[in-house]
Image (cartoon, rainbow, N blue to C red):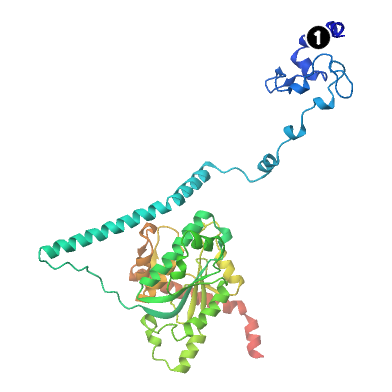
């Protein structure tokens, strides 16, 4: 039987070998596997799929006759794309080189946290040892140990005024901008704590990824900030609560720039509390902030956006019916760059004003030198005030002319 089939088998093999690669690729009877280079190869085919000559399958059909059977087809589980490959092709775009570098640097920084802590501890121990050795050396020489010169700290006075930092812009900032904002509002606390006259500091709408950074990377340090409140309510509700904080027994004294109100009787003081204003500071506002008033709340937009979201704070305040005002920078300062300041700079300017009551001095102390700002002389400031008064008079005349006969008719009636 085997000897009779051998010539037939030999003729078939000879015919297959004479086919070109293209013919083999198009031939359904061919058992060769084609790779990307266009060459055929049958080395990847399992041995069980290559029966001996004359061997029959379970269905009785000879391996030498007819096309490949279903058993010769590849396993679908081996050739179908995996779910992970499909998800990767339809998921988020791959990270850029800069993003990967930032992630690596961040991971490296986090991994060396314990190492940095150990180094700081070693330095502290070494400093104490040096101090102890110097003291022992002074006692051996019969000298009195030198006492550290400590600058006396003046007693800080709490004033009944509130500065709210609106943190409800978490979705408008990138990760690096949130990091910058966290540093800025921490600086606000530091500047207020070191000031001779302090304000109430409140972080409103405190949540999202900004709070997550404070809770994780910064180890919840805001919980130890004295005179600082972190609340989840928005700036409008927070301003209402601030009235109770400032009116409480420990809400603050009428001192410093508020000392002119210290001699008011109880009735006038209650009226002063009711007249407290709520102002959202914005560079897009039409009016200048002339002074800070007691029992008032001043809101700063906690946003770092590189001027992408221009006017967003002004729109938020206008939509909620809150008065807006801008710091009088143009009236007192000659700036070589734009007048938009960081959150901590605005806070520091108001803190400095509470100490000295002069906007020009406050600007010079708080605005960074890189802004290229210089203080206008008194004549420029005076001319600016005169021009502003003239403009206001002209506006009043224009409005009265626009009323025309309608105002007269109303008066006659």
- Image coordinates of residue 298 in percent, x first then y, are 49, 74
| Residue at figure coordinates x 79%, y 7% from the top left | 14
Q: Quadrant of residue 408?
A: bottom right
| Residue at figure coordinates x 77%, y 33% from the top left | 76
Q: Which of 181/208 is in front?
A: 208
15 vs 260: above or below: above
206 vs 413: above or below: above
Residue ID for mark 1: 15
Q: Quadrant of residue 322?
A: bottom right
Counting every numbered tag in the picture gives 1
Q: Secondary structure at mark 1?
A: helix
Quarter in which the C terminus is drawn: bottom right
Q: Which of 178/264 is in front?
A: 178
Q: Is residue 57 visible?
A: yes
Q: Quadrant of residue 91?
A: top right
Q: Is residue 383 visible?
A: no
| Residue at figure coordinates x 52%, y 55% from the top left | 175
75 vs 326: above or below: above
Badge 1: residue crowd in 10 Å (few <14, some 14–19, many ≥20): few
| Residue at figure coordinates x 79%, y 10% from the top left | 13
Q: Which of 89/170 is in front?
A: 89
* Horizontal relation, residue 225 to residue 401: left or right: left
Farthest left residue? 142
* Horizontal relation, residue 166 to residue 123: left or right: right
- Image coordinates of residue 325 in percent, x first then y, are 50, 72
Q: Which of 338/186 is in front?
A: 186
Quarter in which the N terminus is drawn: top right
Farthest front residue? 1
- Image coordinates of residue 258 in percent, x first then y, are 39, 83
- Image coordinates of residue 278 in percent, x first then y, are 52, 77
């Amino acid at each position: 039987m085997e000897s009779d089939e051998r010539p037939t088998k030999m003729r078939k093999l000879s015919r297959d070998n004479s086919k070109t690669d293209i013919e083999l690729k198009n031939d359904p009877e061919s058992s060769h596997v084609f790779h990307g280079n266009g060459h055929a190869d049958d080395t990847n085919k399992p041995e069980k799929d290559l029966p001996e000559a004359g061997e029959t399958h379970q269905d009785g059909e000879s391996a030498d006759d007819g096309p490949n059977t279903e058993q010769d087809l590849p396993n679908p589980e081996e050739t179908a794309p995996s779910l992970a490959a499909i998800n990767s092709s339809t998921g988020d775009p791959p990270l850029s080189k800069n993003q990967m570098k930032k992630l690596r640097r961040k991971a490296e920084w986090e991994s060396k946290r314990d190492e940095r802590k150990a180094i700081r501890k070693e330095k502290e121990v070494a400093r104490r040892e040096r101090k102890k050795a110097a003291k022992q050396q002074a006692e051996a020489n019969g000298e009195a140990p030198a006492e550290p010169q400590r600058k006396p700290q003046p007693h800080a006075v709490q004033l009944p005024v509130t500065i709210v930092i609106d943190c409800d812009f978490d979705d408008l900032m990138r990760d690096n901008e949130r990091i910058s904002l966290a540093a800025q509002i921490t600086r606000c606390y530091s500047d207020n704590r070191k000031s001779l006259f302090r304000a109430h500091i409140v972080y409103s709408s405190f949540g999202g990824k900004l709070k997550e950074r404070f809770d994780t990377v910064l180890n919840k340090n805001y919980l130890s900030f004295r005179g600082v409140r972190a609340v989840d309510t928005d700036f409008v509700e927070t301003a209402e609560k601030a009235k109770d904080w400032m009116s409480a027994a420990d809400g603050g004294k009428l001192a410093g720039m508020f000392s002119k109100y210290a001699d008011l009787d109880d009735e006038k003081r209650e009226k002063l509390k009711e007249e407290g204003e709520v102002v959202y500071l914005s560079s897009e506002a039409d009016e200048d902030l002339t002074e800070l008033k007691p029992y008032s709340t001043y809101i700063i937009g906690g946003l770092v956006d590189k001027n992408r979201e221009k006017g967003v704070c002004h729109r938020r305040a206008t939509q909620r019916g809150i008065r807006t005002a801008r710091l009088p920078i143009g009236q007192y300062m000659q700036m070589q760059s734009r007048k938009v300041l960081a959150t901590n700079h605005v806070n520091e300017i108001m803190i400095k004003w509470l100490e000295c009551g002069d906007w020009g001095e406050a600007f010079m102390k708080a605005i960074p030198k890189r802004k290229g700002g210089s203080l206008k002389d008194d004549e420029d400031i005076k001319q600016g005030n005169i021009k502003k008064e003239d403009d206001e008079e002209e506006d009043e005349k224009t409005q009265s002319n626009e009323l025309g006969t309608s105002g007269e008719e109303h008066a006659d009636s």
